[in-house]
Amino acid sequence: MAYILELKDICKHFGNVLANDHVNLQVEKGTVHSIVGENGAGKTTLMNILYGLYKQTSGEILIDGTKVSIESPSDAIRLGIGMIHQHFKLISAMTVAENVMLGEEPIKGKLFLDLKKINDSTLELSDKYGLAVKPKSMVADISVGIRQRVEILKALYRNANILILDEPTALLTPQESEDLFRIIERLRKDGKTILFISHKLKEIIQISDNITVLRDGKVVDTVKKSKTNEVQLARLMIGRDVFLKPAPKSKKIGEIILKVDNLSAVNEYHHPVLTDISFDVRSGEVLGVAGVDGNGQTELVKALIGLQPVSKGKIKLRDNEITHLSVKKMRSAGIGVIPEDRLQEGLVEDFSVEENLFLGLQRIPPFSNGKIINWNAVHENADSLVKTFDIRTPNITHKARLLSGGNQQKIIVAREIFHAPDTIIAAQPTRGLDIAATDFVHEQLIKQRDSGKAVLLFSLSLDEIMLLSTRIAVIYKGTIVAIVNKDDVTPEDLGLMMLGGSYEHIPA
Amino acid sequence: MHTIRKFFLKRQPVFITIIAVALAFIVVGFILAATGRNPFNAVYYFVRGAFGNVVNTSDTISRVIPLTIAGIAFLIGAQCAVFNVGIEGQLLLGAMASAVVGYIVKLPFYIHLPLMLLAGALAGGLYGLVPAWLKTKRGVNEILSTIMLNYPATYFTHFLVLKVIPIVGVVPATPFIEDTARLPILIEGTQLHAGVFVMILVVIFAYFLLYKTSLGYEMRAVGYNKTAARFHGIPVEKRMNFAFFLSGAMAGLAGAVEVAGVHYRFLDQFSPGYGYDSITVALVGLLNPFGVIISATLFGALKTGILEMSVYSGIPRQLTTLINGIVVLCVAAKDILGGWYARIFRGKDTYEAEKEISQ
């Protein structure tokens, strides 16, 4: 069979590191071919070689059976390869159509852009593949999901036949991901070939025809979708069995630690964002908060750590009311938080690993006497946390910015858990992490639960909620619509409630 | 080989800055050559002018003092996300306040001198609170507010020496300060005064504050990432207000030291733009307290070295401004050098490689 794309013995050295080790890959025309592997397995390097961003150290690339040399992205584009990067490369002050045309603008006369043609051809392309993009919207005003479609449009406009999507769902909500999969399906039907890079097994199984697994820069195996399953893929990726199975049941559920009573809050425009929220979390349990993104989770997390002003209601930690305290006081009262946006909220990227490992603790012993920092204690703390939590960093003075997402998350988890007080709020703690790192974070949260702490878990992933929770609260439009025991519900029930469907309240 | 590479890579910002400065001098050399002058000759007179003998070296150091203290003023702000470009104004008010305290009261020197320096710092610091209030309470961009606030300060001091304080001599100035308020000259016949010790203390203070105290750690956290700082209970606005005050106070102190050590009075338009130079000094010094001393030495030497150079080699003094400008350009554009630098010491794709390794 003729392959549209064939890679033969591709090797890529970075100094002494072999990022791709004799990679062989055959891609059939008109298929969705997934490349999966952990972070650092060499997926992105391979795709960058294909797109001309890197040059392979050795090996051949064949397109339609002909050997080609790809020196730059413009070569790749000429050969019909389009890449949709994980982080979009759009100009937000321009319209969608202007972005699509950028660099290849149709000209009217000698001087002027043919704006009508720009808009018309964008619309035409968008309709053809059901992208539902409005050519005249400003990129600044459109959602992440739509921006991604603009990137797809850019590639299509340049006549791409092979589309590389590099972790396209990393930044999308579940709904947006579903939309993306429909678009991919449509592209495939039209004869386009899709290279889909991901480490999320579920979606890979859902959309791929063929799956190639990379580990440590080598191809471990290429399998047909119909002949594999998540467990097998996970084993291939990691090289061992993984934890991603329901956590063992809570051993000992104790007294109420965190109690929220009729909590309400409004945003800066005085619209209610939280309405009469009540729940409690006990020692030794995980309360999962399930909900579709944007239903008040962010505000609830902020309210619980003092960043979101509360208009009504009470927050109690053990017997102390902490409702209107400052962030500093609420946190020192006993709340640890793994924030949902780790780069913005959880870390100071330009601080070193050790500086990040005592962020928020800079005024308490052993790190300081309140005024002067005890750097010896900081070093010791960093050394021990790096070891315990297996944070992969060349040294503790390395900048956090230079670490991978998984290791950055480990810094946050290590800090919050190690010094954790009574309650840990984990907001999207595994977003964007690969399986091994996810596994690690889950394990740590369960460990904390079993040591008698109260864990409040916010996640957009129902799977994660089902895996870890003891009880589950469903949040919808800023209010808790149900609190149920995990064993009493199915994911389908939860899905229904998350969308506002009613469900008989089961007292938990 | 590996260790050498590592050494150069780790200090990339430092070496790139040095290369950028060297490049600036090479460019200036070409300009001199193009106008028919011998650049090597010029360098000789430049170095002789800046460091050739005790008098020249002392003069250079006396310029380094205000540049360093003012550079630290900018640095303290910048480390806490406060871009105080109003240092010139704060420096002038500080100088005025200290001059007034210097001539109005009679006290023993061990009270008078600290008091007049303190008055300068306080005046600058309080003036720094104006943009602080505008920023943290009203959301006014501090780059705009501080640069505009330089004008009222300049004209207010101008007004004081012209209209309010009786003129004693021919130039608009305050009366001379008491001997007890003066920083003693260290080497007879030169301009080198005891302000150099104040400068060293200020540098050590800034280093200690920023890197050894919880407060400084919090200020730096705010400087790098306000959201994260807020998430971890650091009162962002409070820290920024403090940075405004301290930055202004250091600027005021720089002015006070000039009065106490060089002019012994507030002389109208005495500052050749120390406040503006301080920004360059701090940035070339990579916002590191000790780096600031080094870069202030460079800019101080520029000021004194050019003098001798123009006398002996016939190069116009206006060239100082040109050289200054070229140095700033080169340093500002130094990130262009980053790519070349990395290629020499890393090999091409190593940044990505490092990321991959750390994963």
Image (cartoon, coloured by chain):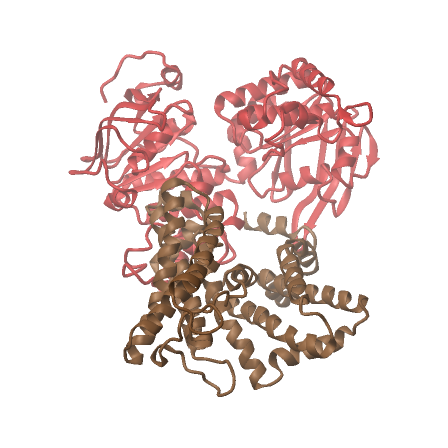
Chain colours: A red, B brown
The N terminus of chain B appears in which quarter of the rendering? bottom right
* A28 lies left or right of A277: right
Would you place residue B169 above or below residue A505 in this image? below
Given residues B52 and B228, the one toward you in this image is B52
- Quick check: A304 left or right of A23? left
Is residue A349 among what the camera can see?
no
Toward the left, the furthest residue is A319
* Residue A348 visible in the current orientation: yes
On the image, the x and y values in percent for residue B186 come to 45, 84
Quadrant of res A225: top right
Task: Say above or below: A455 vs A159.
Answer: below
Residue at the image position 53 percent from the left and 81 percent from the top: B58
**In the displayed structure, would residue B61 be above or below residue B237?**
below
Say how many tags the image has. Answer: 0
Most foreground residue, B131 or A280: B131
Relative to residue A92, is residue B185 drawn left or right? left
Q: Which of A4 and A236 is in front in this view?
A: A4
Residue A44, image x and y in percent? 63, 39
Q: Which residue lies furthest to the right in this view?
A: A66
Q: In which quarter of the image is residue A252?
A: top left
- Tell me the residue at 74%/23% (across/down): A29
Residue drawn where x is 80% and y is 67% of the image: B35
Residue B232, position as x, y percentages in the image: 35, 46
- Residue A488 location, x and y as percent? 30, 19
Taking A367 as reference, is B66 left or right?
right
Q: In which quarter of the image is residue B17?
A: bottom right
